[in-house]
Image (cartoon, helix red, strand yellow):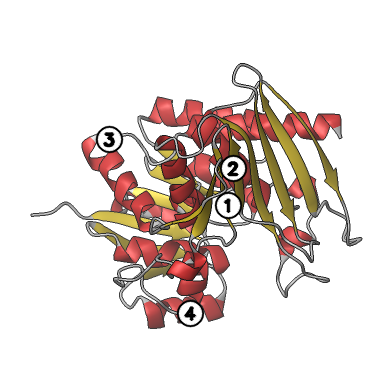
Amino acid sequence: MEKILPVVLIGYGTGGSIFHAPFINACQGMKLAAVVTSNKERQEAIARTYPGTKVYDGMEAMLQDREQFQLAVITTPNHMHHSQARSCLEAGLHVVVDKPFCLTAAQAEDLIAQAQASGKIISPYHNRRFDSDFLTLRKVLEENLVGTPFRLESRIERFRARPKPGGWRETTSASEGGGVLYDLGSHLIDQAIALFGPPDDIYGKLQERRGLGVEDDLFLALDYKETKLQVHLYASMACLSPGPRFTLSGSTGAFIKEKGCPQEDMLKAGVSPLAPHFGQEPASDWGSLLTDGGEKHKVETVAGNWLTYYQTMRLAILDGAPPPVPARAAWQGLKLMEKLRERC
């Protein structure tokens, strides 16, 4: 019989309800056994959507039943990640932590050490390694379609004059885990590390554009000296003219991907991760490859699927396979964030 991995989800806001629960529930060999939330409306929503899933009001009550679970998924406000992840590791659970993994590199190092001491796996939920646009960019690089790359521009730019209701990430101070660097910046930095490793140096700027008390506009350049590659990252909540999601320039061509991954919109529309068309784009949204001769070709978008993250995590726990994202990558990303803050 197939081994079923019981999972407890800690937190059930937008992150828990949209980005985690549907994939845990859809992952063959996993079970959404419990959710921790004290919010009564969310408890009622869980009962309707996932009948049979146990609900706990708090961490303490859940940890008393820790032997019922193997994996804890933490998707609570950012400043709580370190302490909750540590408690779960100490309780003998494997752990997934939503981004940002922690608020500091020192906290990340502490969790990595605790996981090693406990003999457990801890992995940051950098689900955007499984975005359709990113998977397509990786394919372009692997197939050498633009020659030697010398510049990558990666953008997640949005505009909201005021934060959306409940948008604590846009109003909470950076010391408490708010701001665009921890939010969108975490994804952009991790994707760059996944492709090229940590850079030799960085420069950039963090700015507050909307008067909300925390930075909402980011530019970060990663400098790879040996290959002379430059990676330029842009993240903003105050940009009315967003640029392409990716622009890759190389010695023999360029690749431009205008639109980002459709998975989030599909989930919000109620599309199941198990739907045959999940994560797929229409041909009209495919990126373009430009060649030295001036030719322009469409590049079929690789279907994205964040479900891959949980499928890989299950194999890591049960079969000893590598985790979907190593915790050390999150530590490297936090080191870059700290260096940027020192220089701004």
Residue 310 horizontal/vertical position (percent): 35, 52
Q: What residue appears at the point 82 percent right and 51 percent down from the top-left corner?
A: 215
Query: What residue does disc 3 label?
Result: 321
Label 1 close to label 2 by CB (< 8 Å): yes
CA separation in Å, label 3 and label 2? 32 Å
Q: Is residue 36 left or right of residue 70?
A: right
Decide which of tag 4 and tag 1 comes sooner along the chain: 1
Decide which of tag 4 and tag 2 comes sooner along the chain: 2
Q: Quadrant of residue 305?
A: bottom left
Decide which of tag 1 and tag 2 comes sooner along the chain: 2
Residue 282 horizontal/vertical position (percent): 43, 70
CA separation in Å, label 3 and label 1? 34 Å
CA separation in Å, label 3 and label 4? 33 Å
Query: What residue does disc 2 label?
Result: 248
Q: What residue appears at the point 64 percent right and 28 percent down from the top-left corner?
A: 106
Decide which of tag 3 and tag 4 comes sooner along the chain: 4
Q: Which mark is residue 269?
A: 4
Q: Which mark is residue 256?
A: 1
Residue 184 horizontal/vertical position (percent): 66, 52
Q: Quadrant of residue 6?
A: bottom left
CA separation in Å, label 1 and label 2? 6 Å
Label 4 close to label 1 by CB (< 8 Å): no
Q: Amino acid at mark 4?
A: Ala
Residue 225 horizontal/vertical position (percent): 66, 18
Give the number of the mark in front: 3 or 2.
2
Q: Quadrant of residue 150?
A: top right
User: Going by the picture, which residue comes out furthest to the left?
Assistant: 1
Q: Is residue 270 left or right of residue 294?
A: left
Q: Amino acid at mark 1?
A: Ile
Q: Amino acid at mark 2?
A: Leu
